[in-house]
Image: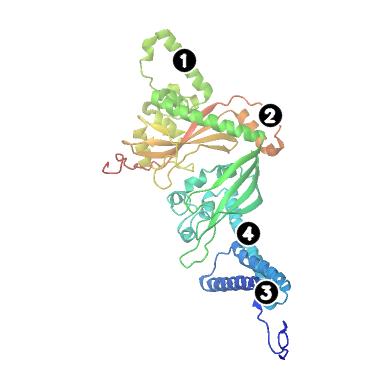
Amino acid sequence: MNELRPIPSSQTAPGQTTYQAVAGFAIAAMVCAGLFSLVMVVYLIMGAFKQGSDQSYLLLLLPAAGVVCAILARRQIDNSGGTRIGVQISSAAWWICFVGGAGYAAFVYANQLFMEQDARQMVDKWFAELKEGKPGYAYIYCVEPLKRADLNPDDIESLSTSTSGASYAEMINNDLVQLVLRNVDNVKFIHRATSTAPSDPGTQTLYHTYQIECAEGIFTSTIVTTITRNSKNQRMPWLVGSTSYGTFAANLNQDKVSNYGFFVERLKDQGAQFANRWMETQRASYYRSHLMTCPTVHRYQKNEQLAINYAVLGAQAMTVPLELTIDDLPIDRAGNLDPAKFSPFDDLLNIGFFKKPGSNDPLSSTKLDQLRELWKSPKIVANVAGFTAGPDKTFDKWQYEFKNDQVRVVFPVKIMLRGTDYALGKIIVAVEQPEVNNILSGLRQEGLNSVDLEKRPKIPEPFWKVIGLETDLERIVPPAQGPPGGPQGS
């Protein structure tokens, strides 16, 4: 009879254990935690030895993935029936990723907030200098930090040759800058928002949105600030308005226009047209262009007299060149001149027509002698097409001014010298009627309190006259224009 043998048991014999694999999600969570910790250590080293490193919210993807994997690992272990382990691993990974990620997020947010406030303070300082009527001091904030000490903010000529950052001409001709300089006594700046912009490696760019309130209306402006690093990877002070490409970036949008602002735009264009007409008239008739420096009533009287002479003498009179004499001038101007030594140039010189740029100072005797010779057959052309003569000597916009209760428009020109050489200058035209200037002065004082278009006051048709020419008469030689394809024409 065969011996009975027991049936093998499915239970594990005492002293033996079943293999339990580590949950895959627990391993993934610990890998995320480890990589995140390693990156944090690298950041600490970079911050200690290189004084600053860039932080990004993208790094939070690692701790976020680690937290998700840790949660999935706990579920995987609970549903494995004891075949999976890794609770302690997933718990450790969860704490590392959650606490570390939250700390890193808070650090990045605080660092970003600090940088935005630091950049905004620089913009506020830039605005403050403009409001003080000191564009040279404001421009210093647009120059590369290491080169700021070499510039004198009171020396506009030296600023005009700076090649560090945006050019002075770009800044001074910007619509936002011109708006502030026209309204230094009543302009207000209200910060609305700061946002991060796409940046090149090694730089960071922020956009600052401001609401500008002044006598001309309410405007919205966005100005850029850029920060770079030096050779030691240290952050430099912020550049205001200057981009990493060396251009000036600040826009201006009009939200509400006051009655004064409406007339500013209207008179600015009218003044520019008058300045341009003066230059065209000068090329056709030196006599008539000189009369445009006289009061309008006097000018009309002389033109009517010419029309009568032409009607009486016929077409033959039109062929005779008109020659300006002392009798053609207003009495107050003629009385200050010697009839025996009269010349149109001396008349303009006597009324302070020729000035140095940005001042009421006369030109040197050498420059005046040179200009006197040029004035025998002057050729002055507009310089409003963005023509660049060197790094910064350009004026590409005409500007409106309200000085000493008088409306003025400054128009950029080129004074042609020999051949294609020229000097830069500005023609200044002004409204001569006191009643027009008084109305504008009142509207300027009312500012935003006068925005009702239906109650917009009517002003008399403004009479313009040319009141000055600003120039340093420095010769500028334009770059040679070679044939297509380069110097060899190939």
Quickly name the residue at label 1. Answer: 305
- Nearest the viewer among 248 and 44 is 44
Marks 3/2 in contact by CB < 8 Å: the verdict is no
Looking at the rendered structure, the secondary structure element under dot 1 is: helix
Foreground tag (4 vs 3): 3
Rounded to the nearest whole Å, what is the CA distance between mark 1 and mark 3?
102 Å
Using the image, determine if residue 150 lies above or below residue 184: below
Residue 376 relative to residue 40: left or right: left
Foreground tag (4 vs 1): 4
Q: Point out residue 378 in the picture as x, y percentages from the top left corner.
A: 37, 31
Q: Point out residue 316 in the picture as x, y percentages from the top left corner.
A: 36, 11
Quickly name the residue at label 3. Answer: 90
Q: Point out residue 324 in the picture as x, y percentages from the top left corner.
A: 40, 23
Q: Quadrant of the C terminus?
A: top left
Foreground tag (2 vs 1): 2
Using the image, determine if residue 312 lies above or below residue 229: above
| Residue type indicated by callout 4 | Gln
Q: Tag 2: Cα neighbours inside 10 Å, few (<14), some, or many (≥20)? A: some
| Residue type indicated by callout 3 | Ser
Residue 105 position by quadrant: bottom right
Foreground tag (2 vs 4): 4
| N-terminal-most mark, 4 or 3 | 3
Quickly name the residue at label 2. Answer: 456
Residue 278 relative to residue 121: left or right: left
Q: Which residue occupies 47% across, 18% down?
A: 303
Looking at the rendered structure, the secondary structure element under dot 3 is: helix
Rounded to the nearest whole Å, what is the CA distance between mark 3 and mark 2?
74 Å
| Residue type indicated by callout 2 | Arg
